Image: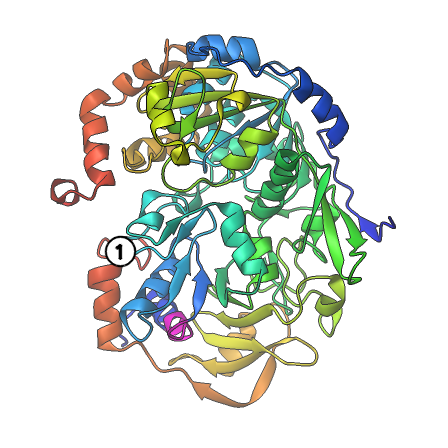
């Protein structure tokens, strides 16, 4: 029996993706925890930015809002929305973490609505916020989300934020900045990337305790498979200690 | 210029820069005192049917006294800029103040969850929406502040967010690159909460500015609430701190703790217990009605609201939390 839960596993896996010296725009919750963990492990020079204007703070505790005072605690700059988004648009930001109610095989995300009538939706979600902007501008978009067949949908009912759009070269033709797009999808079961030509999601590594079948059974579309699928390394004691004691002592994000 | 594609969303405000110039030509440049109560400012400058923008970031440096007063005075059929809006949106939705909305971020309170009542309102079909993003709304304000009718940007293309927006795809005359043209917003009226203002409306704000620099300049009328009023001499002693000049401003209201229950940078943290109460009570319409009566309709002003929810003891605890004083963390 593993001595960590799925949220801790996803956060530790995600943190390892963020190399020292890179830059990232994060939201609240798990993405923030992953960026803080990266800073406290292998990537002390990770530049953390917040869309509301906070730039490179020494985050003392998890923010509740991407605009609250924790996002500018001992920061190098307290700026604004345009400053951060335009830093992304100029090509200076490597990563962002996004999520949504639905994700399709090209990594497109829905955080706007469920139901066919836009003016009278069955379920209304917040909308893009800064997600569409960050998905458009940051070089590599990461998604951290629990995996189930409803969320991993054949088709998003609404594409709020761009993945590889309709696959192939559709994103390149859309007018969005060239070379940016979804990079890795980190779930409780596996890590997926995107096949370079078709831009379809494919399994690249699997978490301990899960099989390829588990991953496919919990996905609403057919996943491609990398030539060699490896097993992900579980969180280390050091990672878990930092996450539990320094980053999320009240277990707001990692849960009980 | 050839339009390659366009969204189906309605543009709720007129982006015509010459019409805006004609308005601003007549706006007073007089250096006169503009201090008044929030009640008076809302009576004078916020009208049914107009397009409203609220500054700050949802529950951070938000002019909550103005938001409550708009609901208390029963403003209706307004257009609203749902840009980085969270608790402000929740309160305006509770008062059914708007019937059309430019959506960038609505119904959610970030890590705190979604507002059941705001969601119900947006699912009712009573509110017409156009979809945008936080940055594209920021750009639309920036175009307004620059006095031009649109600005180009590189987001939203290829998505349904674009399809349901009022943006248009055009080509760069220099490089041939595609851009989305975003129409300027000149809000009829906006409210912004700042740390300090003088009696004429020269403002200082600390911490993040979000889009307030541009919102202030693009708005036809602007209500400022300030934690405190400072002398004009202090503004002139070091003008490098001024973020909004007086000629943008129509009303100055001194409202200490004016962002409560939101966060105010280096002043007080957000009242998370009370914000949780808002989300919880919305699940029961009858309880919610009583809650609104208690906290908005039967309150004279913002101070009565704070007094009903813990008063100075609460504020002091939130000040300790803001500064991460040891006591607040124990």
A145 displayed left or right of A132: left
**Residue shown at 19%/29% (left/top)?**
B316
What sort of colour scheme is used for the picture? rainbow
Q: Position of residue A175 (x, y in %)?
A: 73, 61
**Residue projecting furthest to the bottom:** A228
Does residue B134 sit above or below B245 in this rendering? below
Q: Is residue B55 above or below residue A230?
A: above
Q: Residues within 10 Å of mark 1 (few under 14, many from 20)?
A: few
Q: Does residue B324 show up magenta in the picture? A: no
Towards the viewer: A151 or B76: B76
Task: Judge left or right: residue A69 versus residue B134.
Answer: left
| Quarter-of-image position of residue B10 | top right
Subunit under mark 1: A
Q: Nearer the viewer, residue B114 or B176?
A: B176
Q: Is residue B95 left or right of residue A174?
A: left
- Residue at image x 45%, y 74%? A189
Could you tell me which secondary element the residue under label 1 belongs to? loop
The x, y position of residue A196, in whole percent, is: 65, 81
Could you say which is closer to the camera, residue B48 or residue B216?
Answer: B216
Specify whether residue B285 is in view: yes
Note whether B5 is above or below A12 in the view shown: above
A68 w.r.t. A22: above or below: above
Residue B85 placed where, x, y %? 50, 36
User: Can residue B229 be seen?
Assistant: no
Quarter placement of the C terminus of chain A: bottom left
Residue at the disc numbered 1: A251
Residues rendered magenta in the picture: A13-21
């Amino acid at each position: 029996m593993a001595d960590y839960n799925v949220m801790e596993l996803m956060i530790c896996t995600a943190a390892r993706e963020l190399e020292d010296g890179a830059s990232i725009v994060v939201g609240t919750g798990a993405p923030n925890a992953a960026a803080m963990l990266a800073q406290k492990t292998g990537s002390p020079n990770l530049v953390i930015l917040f869309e509301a204007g906070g730039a490179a703070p020494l985050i003392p505790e998890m923010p509740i809002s991407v605009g609250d005072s924790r996002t500018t605690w001992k920061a190098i700059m307290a700026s604004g929305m345009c400053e951060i988004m335009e830093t992304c648009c100029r090509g200076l930001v490597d990563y962002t973490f996004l999520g949504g109610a639905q994700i399709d095989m090209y990594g497109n995300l829905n955080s706007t609505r469920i139901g066919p009538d836009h003016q009278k939706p069955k379920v209304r979600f917040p909308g893009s916020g800064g997600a569409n902007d960050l998905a458009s501008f940051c070089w590599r978009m990461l998604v951290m989300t629990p995996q189930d067949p409803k969320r991993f949908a054949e088709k998003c009912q609404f594409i709020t934020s761009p993945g590889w759009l309709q696959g192939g070269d559709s994103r390149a033709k859309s007018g969005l900045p060239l070379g940016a797009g979804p990079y890795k999808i980190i779930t409780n079961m596996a890590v997926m990337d995107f096949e370079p030509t078709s831009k379809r999601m494919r399994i690249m590594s699997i978490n301990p305790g899960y099989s390829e079948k588990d991953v496919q059974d919990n996905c609403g579309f057919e996943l491609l498979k990398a030539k060699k699928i490896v097993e992900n390394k579980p969180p280390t004691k050091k990672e878990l200690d930092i996450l539990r004691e320094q980053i999320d002592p009240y277990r707001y994000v990692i849960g009980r | 210029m050839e339009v390659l594609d366009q969204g189906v969303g309605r543009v709720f405000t007129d982006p015509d820069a010459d019409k805006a110039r004609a308005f601003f030509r007549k706006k007073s440049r007089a250096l006169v005192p503009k201090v008044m109560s929030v009640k008076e400012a809302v009576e004078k400058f916020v009208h049914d049917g107009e397009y409203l923008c609220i500054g700050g970031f949802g529950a951070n440096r938000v002019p909550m006294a103005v938001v409550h007063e708009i609901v208390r005075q029963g403003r209706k059929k307004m257009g609203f800029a749902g840009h980085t809006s969270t608790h402000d949106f929740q309160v305006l939705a509770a008062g059914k103040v708007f019937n059309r909305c430019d959506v960038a971020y609505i119904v959610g309170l970030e890590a705190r969850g979604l507002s059941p009542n705001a969601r119900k309102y947006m699912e009712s079909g009573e509110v017409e929406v156009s979809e945008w993003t936080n940055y594209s709304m920021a750009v639309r304000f920036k175009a307004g502040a620059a006095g031009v009718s649109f600005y180009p940007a590189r987001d939203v293309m290829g998505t349904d967010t674009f399809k349901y927006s009022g943006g248009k795809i055009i080509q760069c005359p220099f490089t041939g690159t595609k851009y989305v043209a975003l129409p300027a917003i000149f809000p009829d009226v906006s409210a912004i909460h700042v740390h300090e203002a003088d009696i004429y409306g020269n403002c200082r704000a600390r911490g993040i500015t979000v889009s307030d620099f541009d919102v202030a300049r693009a708005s036809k009328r602007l209500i400022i609430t300030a934690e405190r009023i400072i002398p004009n001499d202090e503004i002139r002693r070091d003008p490098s701190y001024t973020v909004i000049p007086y000629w943008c401003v129509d009303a100055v209201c001194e409202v200490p703790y004016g962002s409560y229950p939101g966060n105010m940078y280096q002043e007080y943290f957000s009242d998370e217990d009370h914000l949780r109460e808002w989300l919880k009570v919305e699940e029961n319409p009858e309880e919610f009605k009583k809650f609104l009566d208690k906290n908005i309709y039967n309150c004279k002003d913002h101070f009565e609201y704070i007094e009903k929810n813990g008063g100075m003891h609460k504020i002091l605890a939130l000040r300790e939390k803001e500064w991460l004083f040891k006591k607040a963390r124990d």
